[in-house]
Image (tube, coloured by chain):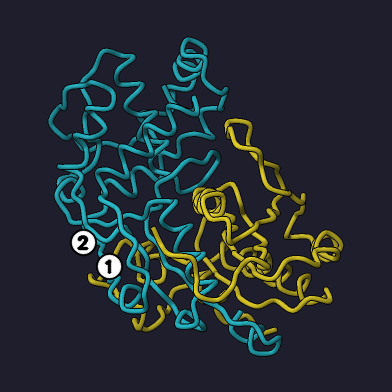
Chain colours: A cyan, B yellow
Amino acid sequence: MADWSSKHGASWTVLRPHLVMGPSLNSPMNLVTSLAVYAAISRELGLPLRFPGRREGWNTLQETTDAELFGRSTLWALGEDKARNEIFNVSNGDVYRWRQLWNELATFYDLPVAEPLAMSTVSEMSEKGPLWDSIVARYGLHPTPYEQIANWSFVDWMLNFGEETILSTIKIRKAGFADCIDTHESFRRQLTNLRKLRVIP
Amino acid sequence: MTPTPKESASDREILLVGPYGVLGTGVIDAVMANSAWRVTTAARRPAPTYRTQAPPRHINVDLMDREGTIKAFANLDTVTDLAYAAYVEKPTMAETVEPNARMLTNTLEALAARNVPLKRIVLAGGAKSYGFSLGSFNAPAKETEPRLIAPIHYHKQEEHRG
C-alpha cells in the first residue's frame, strides 16, 4: 500500500485498533456477540454467569476499541494532514480487566456471577446450537445461525490472554484525535444496541 | 465527538471495503453521523437484514477475483478515498497472508484503473502487528515497534509492491 500510494499520489494511514466491539455477524473476531450468546445460554439454563477463562485472563489489564470510535478515527485520518503516511494505534483511551468488566455482562442479563473456571468454550459450547435456535424463536430475534453469531475459538483466545495488552495511544492523541469512551459504557452500549437490533436477547 | 476535518470534505466519498464486519460497521455508523462524508460499500454480501437504517450504495464484489473487481469499480467516479476493512481468516497466520494481501492489491489496482485519483487510504490493522496472535505482547506497544519475523498479513499489506 505504501508503494502503491507513492506511485499514485495518494496518502495512506494505518489504524491499529484492538478487540473491536460493535454489531456484526459472521465476523471471525467479534467478542461482544459471542459473549452475549454465552450469557443468554447461561440464563436459559438457569446458571450463574461464569468466566470460562484462566486466572491470568481474568486479572490482566486489557484494552479495546469501540466500533464507532474506530469509525470516527477513520474519518479523522482521511481528513487530517498529520495522518498522512503514518501508523496510529487507536483504542477507547482507558484499560479494563475482565474481573471488573464481566459484571456489566452479568448485570445486562440480570445474572449472578460464579467463580471463574477455565474451560474450552470451543468444546463445551459446541452442542448448544439447538438451544440458541430456540432462544431465537422464543425472543423473535433475527434468525442468525449459531456459528455466525459466536466464535468460540476467539472467545477462548481472548479470555485466556495472559499478557497485558495495552497499545499506546499517545501518538494519535498528540496528532489531534482525542476522542475516547469509557470501556464499561461502550460495552453496555454495544450490548444494548444489539438487543435493540434484535440480534441478541 | 471529533470535529469535522479542516479540509473541506463535502466532495469526499469513501469506498468502504469490508463494510459489515465489526470494523466496517463502525465506519458506516460514523459516516451516517457526519454529513461531511459520503460512503459506498463493497463486499460479497449486501447489508445484513438486522440493520434498521437504509444502507448506503453497495457494490457486490469478490475481491479475490481481479478482473471482477476491476469491472465492479470501473465506474466509481465519485469515490475519492478508500477505507479498507476487509479480512479473510484462514486456519494459520501463514495461510492468511496471501489472500488478504491479494484482496488489497486487487482493490488498489481496480481503483487505479479509474479516471479519478485516490486521495487518501485508511488500512485497518491491529494488535497482531505486536505479537497478539503469537500469544505474546510487550505493553505498551508503540507504532515504532519493529516488525515481527512471523508471517503477519498486515506487514504484507502495508508494503504492497504496486
- The amino acid at mark 2 is Glu
- Position of the N terminus of chain B, as image quadrant, is bottom left
Neighbour tally class for label 1: few under 14, some 14-19, many 20 plus, Cα within 10 Å: many
Q: Which residue is mark 1?
A: B137
Q: Which mark is residue A66?
A: none
Residue B89 in the figure: left or right of residue A175: right
- The amino acid at mark 1 is Phe
Q: Residue at x 45, y 83 (%)?
A: A82
**Residue B58 at x, y percent in the picture:** 73, 49
Q: Residue at x 49, y 71 (%)?
A: A77
Name of the residue lying farthest toward the top:
A138
Residue A93 in the figure: left or right of residue A143: left
Q: Quadrant of residue A61?
A: bottom left
What's the chain of the residue with tag 1? B
Residue A48 visible in the snapshot: yes
Which of the two residues, A59 or B20, is positioned nearer the viewer here?
B20
Q: Quadrant of residue A115?
A: top left
Q: Quadrant of residue B46?
A: top right
Q: Secondary structure at mark 1?
A: loop
Q: Which residue is mark 2?
A: A164
Q: Are marks 2 and 1 in contact (CB under 8 Å)?
A: yes
